[in-house]
Image (cartoon, rainbow, N blue to C red):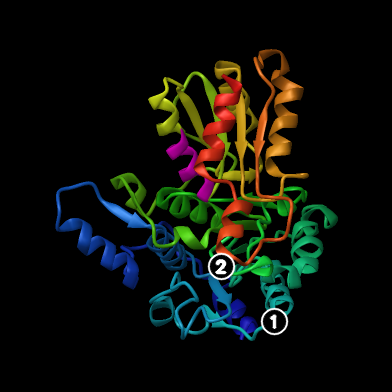
Amino acid sequence: MLIKILRQYQVHVVAGGGGAPTSFLYKTFRNSSSSSSSVKKMTVREALNSALDEEMSADRRVLLMGEEVGEYQGAYKVSKGLLQKHGPERVVDTPITEAGFTGIGIGAAYYGLRPVVEFMTFNFAMQAMDHIINSAAKTNYMSAANISVPIVFRGPNGAAAGVGAQHSQCYAAWYGSVPGLKVLAPYSSEDARGLLKAAIRDPGPVVFLENELLYGEAFPVSDEVVDSSFCIPIGKAKIEKQGKHVTITSFSKMVGFSLKAAEILAEDGIDAEVINLRSIRPLDRSTINGSVRKTNRLVTVEEGFPQHGVGAEICASIVEDSFDYLDAPVERIGGADVPMPYAANLERMALPQVEDIVRAAKRLI
């Protein structure tokens, strides 16, 4: 089937940004937002769905493949309506074999298609690690830049709720250590929409780490974000809240926790600056160092294991480039150094909480 798609689409690329998106979730959003003069809101699920739809409409080389992405419309309904609009040759239901369909997707990328490979969870992507690292990340370098691998690996990453150790791991640090990969972790609907578009258009392999608990969360979006041309540059962090006393860096779901912590800290007169990393690799060291040079204090927050984590890399960057600006030791907040417990009370103890961020920031002041 993919050979047929290659022959059909290899030289037939639709130019421009495509027409108005018509996916089910996007139409639902447009209809609900146009009926009110208040600030428009969009869920992360709608943002991902509309970004996929628009990029598939704009470029016929883009296809979506994975388990249950078509007939079932996605395990989390991110691909709702895409099979009906784009057809089974571009929304491909695969067998339950991550190694198999990941390899097929990478092979298609070698020959000019732009596959988006969905994993039901990135925990299952471990079955395909050889292909992601050895076949996707290294090929451009090993071929002296003669072979590009424009492919996106996307799906939920990190903890959900009550799904145990084998479905709860954060892989940001794993993939973030690999040359040849770009690694993105969106928080808001703006992030999800703009970063996924950037990932699909990128000439190399991109790991796109979503969060299951954020899919149904709605965020305000501007007219610029809704526009089909909207795209967020890879490698650029966003300062979600300006501050002057302490810098808090985080990504994905932990950005929301960090913003809540900043509100609590403000009640005690502590003005925290919150940075949404967005991009794990490349890491926006300039924005992080610039913030720490202003606030003179740093707290890093992530769900993943603390050893060799994203926060550890950020701390190393600060020590290397901005050590003389620090007025206190850096604080790292991460998940507990144990496999994720199944019991709800233990699960909560194993994950960073808002109060952990507040306490860490207060220790620095």
Nearest the viewer among 178 and 125 is: 125
Q: Which residue is mark 2?
A: 162
Looking at the figure, which quarter contains the N terminus? bottom right
Q: Amino acid at mark 1?
A: Thr
Is 257 one of the magenta-colored residues? yes
Nearest the viewer among 290 and 273 is: 273
Looking at the figure, which quarter contains the C terminus? top right
Look at the image and give the residue range highlighted in magenta.
253-261
107 left or right of 269 in image: right
Is 49 one of the magenta-colored residues? no
* Percent coordinates x, y for residue 71 in the rendering: 46, 86
Nearer to us: label 1 or label 2: 2
Quarter of the rendering containing residue 287: top right
* Callout 2 secondary element: loop
Mark 1 or mark 2: which comes first in sequence?
1
* Percent coordinates x, y for residue 100 in the rendering: 72, 80
* Callout 1 secondary element: loop
Q: How many marks?
A: 2
Residue 111 appears in view: no
* Percent coordinates x, y for residue 157 in the rendering: 60, 60
Q: Which residue is mark 1?
A: 97
Q: Amino acid at mark 2?
A: Gly
